[in-house]
Amino acid sequence: MSHILVVDDNSDVRRLLSLSLVKKYEVIEADNGMAALYAIRRFHPAAVLLDVMMPGEMDGLQVLDAIKSDPKTRDIPVAMITARGQKLDQEDAMRRGADAFFVKPFSPQQVVSWVHDISH
């Protein structure tokens, strides 16, 4: 079963995505950027669902930069999930290597469909 990493500082968002994905995927959760990078190195997930705005040492864009700059992880698809829905935010994330961009409040079904499409 493929691992999917859900990274968000909001436990309700993590729970919503986990419940939406758990039937078909092994879901791993992280609540900050450093935990996300640890989980990526440990599990090498099939996809990462990554919040942009998180407290701590690294925000989601910094995590995205770390994923995409590492030859061992750069091929992992990353979807940004954020309340920042401005066109410039989306363009910045895509320029940095994001594979998808979902704006909160998002449709869990859209996210599940994206994960399914990229993991098969």
Image: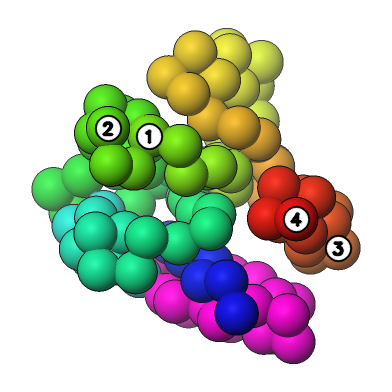
- Badge 3 is on which residue? 109
Query: Closer to the N terminus: mark 4 or mark 3?
Result: 3
The amino acid at mark 2 is Pro
Tag 3: residue type?
Gln
User: Which residues make up the magenta segment?
Assistant: 8-29
Side (left or right) of 70 relative to 87: left
- Give whichever of discs 3 and 2 has the lower sequence position: 2
* Residue 116: image location, x then y, percent: 77, 59
Which label was assigned to residue 113? none
Q: Residues within 10 Å of mark 3 (few under 14, many from 20)?
A: few
How many angstroms separate mark 2 from mark 1 (CA)? 5 Å
**Is 54 situated above or below 6?**
above
Badge number at residue 74:
1
Of the residues under marks 1 and 4, which one precedes in the sequence? 1
**Which residue is at a point 53% across and 67% down the rendered structure image?**
4
- Give amino acid for label 4: His
Separation of marks 4 and 3 at Cα, in angstroms:
16 Å
